[in-house]
Amino acid sequence: MDAHRRLLAESDSDIFSHIRAEEQRQTDGLELIPSENYTYPEVLAALGSVLTNKYSERYPGRRYYGGQEHTDAIETIARERAKALFRAEHANVQPLSGSPMNQAVYFAFLQPGDTILAMDLSHGGHLTHGAPVSHMGKVFNFVRYKTEADGSIDFDKMRALALEHRPRMVLAGHSSYPRDLDYAAFQRIADEVEALSFADVSHVGGLIAADCLANPLDAGFDVMTTTTHKSLRGPRGGLILCKAEHAKAIDASVFPGLQGGPHMNQVTASAITFRKAATEEFRAYSQQVLVNARVLADELSNAGAQLITGGTNNHLMVIDTIRSFGLDGRRAEQVLDRIGITTNKQVIPDDPLPPLRPSGVRLGTPACTTRGMKEGDMRLLAGWMDEALRSPDDESLLDRLGEQVRAHCRQFPVPGIGAE
Ligand code: DSN
């Protein structure tokens, strides 16, 4: 045990025992929540470093407080790495996470009451894309586009909405949509109505960095945001990338508009993440994330599961558990939890059921791929899930499946969790 852990174990055994138990849970369990991942040991080291002590309001070379020679250097490296990684003209690495990052973008360009065209929440959009329960939904006027029955987006319908409502911003982005987006089609609509184009690629940021999925900035988008912890594998955090002409507005909106001092330990960890994401190794990892998702989706479909849009071509999929197994998403999540597979309940398009007991579950492959799982593991996994969801009350079957999941997972170490 290293010195810091020993100190924590001795000084606060209550908390330390929970950290140890969570490490055991992460080791023994199969993590399929598509927004989660296992970060790098180097990121954990940076997050736990003394950079957490420093206040660094404003930007490198223009801070309010003294003592910034190292924070300036680190933030500059982080910005330059992010720009190179995503082929962006400007990067702001200070957003504390996904929600503040998107709020900063809205407030950089819009006035309260302005109209934003965004994906409907139940069709895959995100809370921060103006769900009525979110503050943003109260401040701005969100108009919604939806997906078609086959999961595609009908751009003629979206164009008609844009011409009717004249949004000031067109937003492409999702948190539970299993398909890539045609960013050029979004851009054409934004151009026609003279709106800003904004892509929130939080879920697929790593896959875009690895050039495995299309980059909205290549299609001419004004602004793109991504969280840094999902497919990118970094610390919890947010990143805003934009055209040079928007740099001033974005930076002022993050600070002093929305946030105080950035978390410099997080910025440091992001810099480390961006360097790793530029490697061949990360590209191979990202390709495997996509292959694993496709195999898992195919296997589940072959076993009779009904997947929203019929499958996936990114890292995630949504099972309609009502139609597939006669279980609502909450019950399906519980059954899978019972055998050590972690998923999340998920609304499906125009879900007739409420959000806390919706019709589906959402799965994704970034985390299990980080542990080194491949196609054969996806086949096993699909079989275990199918068995459990077809016999949710068979306790001895669930015990046996739980043992199999645990034994399998223990063959794949979790980065950052060592034996002690
Ligand atoms: N909570 C994240 C997700 O699961 O998609 C997004 O905020």
Image: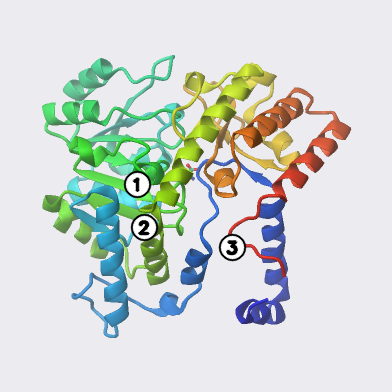
Image quadrant holding the N terminus, namely bottom right
Of the residues under marks 3 and 2, which one precedes in the sequence?
2
Question: What residue is rendered at 29% in x and 52% in y?
Answer: 85
Of the residues under marks 1 and 2, which one precedes in the sequence?
1
Question: What residue is rendered at 64% in x and 20% in y?
Answer: 322
Q: List x then y, in percent, for residue 259.
A: 32, 63
Secondary structure at numbered mark 2: helix
Q: Are marks 1 and 3 in contact (CB under 8 Å)?
A: no
Dot 2 amino acid type: Phe
- Answer left or right for 420 relative to 281: right
- Count of labels in the image: 3
The answer for how far apart the CA atoms under marks 1 and 2 are is 9 Å
Q: Are marks 1 and 2 in contact (CB under 8 Å)?
A: yes
Secondary structure at numbered mark 1: helix
Question: What residue is rendered at 66% in x and 65% in y?
Answer: 418
The answer for how far apart the CA atoms under marks 1 and 3 are is 23 Å
Secondary structure at numbered mark 3: loop
Q: Nearer the viewer, residue 307 or 370?
A: 370
Q: List x then y, in percent, for residue 379.
A: 65, 30
Q: Is residue 320 above or below residue 249?
A: above
Q: List x then y, in percent, for residue 76.
A: 25, 68
Image quadrant holding the C terminus, namely bottom right
**Residue at which label 2 appears:** 274
Disc number placed over residue 209 in the picture, else none: 1
Dot 3 amino acid type: Gly
For residue 250, which quarter of the picture?
A: bottom left
**Residue at which label 3 appears:** 416
| Residue 68 visible from this viewpoint | no
Disc number placed over residue 1 in the picture, else none: none
Q: Residues within 10 Å of mark 3 (few under 14, many from 20)?
A: some
